[in-house]
Amino acid sequence: MKKRRIIMADMPEGADSPLNAAVVERDRSTLDMVAEAIKHNQTMLAYQPVMQALPPQQPAFYEGYIRVLDATGRVIPAREFMPVVEDKEIGRVLDCLALEHGLRALTRSPEIRLSINMSARSIGYGRWMRVIDRFMKKDSTLGERLVLEISEASAMAAPELVVDFMGRMQEHGIAFALDNFGAGTSIIKYFREFFFDAVKIDGQFIRGVHGNHDNQAVTRALVSVAKQFDMLVVAESVETREDADFLVSIGVDCLQGYLFGAPSVSPPWIDELKQRTSA
C-alpha cells in the first residue's frame, strides 16, 4: 500500500486516467471521421435565415454552417466536431470547403445573400485565398452578396492581419460581421480600425432577455456601441416571441434563431420562392 502511495504521488495529476484516455480516443475518432468526410466529399452547408426585425420581416440573408456526414450518412452538427478541429490543419480545410459551398450557393441563387464563418487563421492559408480568387474571377459580383463572419476571439488573435485582410477584400464588395459580439470587451477599442459592417450579439445575452434585466442592460449597451459605428445589429439565439419583441424595441436590425427556423441542409430560399410564386 505504501509503495502505491509513493507511485501515485510521483505521477502527474490525471496522467493515464481512464477519462483522459477516453477523451483522447474520442478526439482521434472525431478527427478520423472529419478526414473521411473530406476525402469522400461528404461535406455541406446547413442554412439558417437571418430575418429583418421590422415588417415585412423577410430574410436579410442566410448563414451557412459547415456540416460533415459520418460513415452512415448522418449529418453531424459543427458543435460535435469543430472544437476538436478548429486549431488544426483540418480546420482550415473545413473553412475552405465552407467558403466553396457558400460561393457555389450564391452562384446558383443570385437572389440571396449568404454569410460564412471563417477564422483569422484562414487569412494566410493559400487554399482559402485561391477559392476566393477563383470564384471572383468567374463572377466579380459574388462578393457583393457574401458576408464573412469572424468571431471576437479570432479577430483579436491577430487584429493587424484581420484589418489588412478586410481592407483588401473591400475591393470585392465583401461585407464583414463580428460574431459573438459581447463575449469579450477588448475588441471595442479597435472598432475604428476594423471594417465590420455588422455585429452579431452573442446568444448568452439574448436567450430569455425579455425577463433578465442584467442582460437587457448589456444588450442595450452593445446595440448602442454598434449603432455609434453605423453597424447593422443582429441578435443571435432568438427563441421566443417575447425576446424578439424586446430586441425590436431597442433597435436591433435583424433576428436569428430557432424562432424563425433551425439550420437546414435543404436551402430554405427554394421553398420560400415556391410559396411566393404560388401565392
Image (cartoon, rainbow, N blue to C red):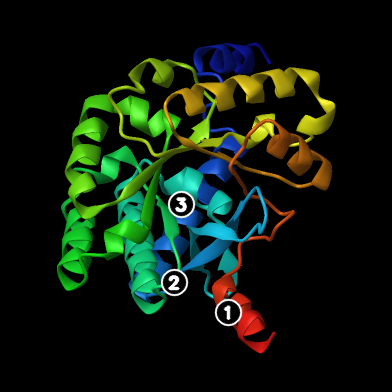
Relative to 250, 109 lies left or right: left
Res. 276 image quadrant: bottom right
Give the residue at mark 1.
Answer: 273
- Label 2 sits on a secondary structure element that is loop
* Spot occupied by residue 53 in the image (x, y as percentages of width and height): 65, 48
SS class, disc 3: helix
**Mark 2 = which residue?**
111
Q: Pointer 3: what residue? A: 28
Query: Looking at the picture, does residue 156 appear above or below residue 89?
Result: above
Work out which quarter of the rendered image holds the C terminus and state it.
bottom right
How far apart marks 3 and 2 lie (CA) works out to 41 Å
Relative vertical location of residue 236 with respect to residue 77 in this rendering, above or below? above
Amino acid type at image mark 3: Arg
Question: Which of the two labelled residues, at mark 3 and mark 1, occupies the earlier sequence position?
Answer: 3
Q: Nearer the viewer, residue 248 or 81?
A: 248
Query: What kind of residue is marked 1?
Result: Leu
Which label belongs to residue 230? none
How crowded pointer 3 is (Cα within 10 Å; few <14, some 14-19, many 20+) is rated as few
Which residue of the protein is positioned furthest toward the front in this rendering?
55
- As drawn, is 208 to the left or to the right of 109? right
Q: In whole angstroms, how far apart are the C-alphas of marks 2 and 1? A: 10 Å
Image quadrant containing the N terminus: top right
- The answer to whether residue 267 is visible is no
Say above or below: 225 vs 236: above
Expressed as whole percent of the image width and height from the top left, the position of residue 226 reads 49, 27
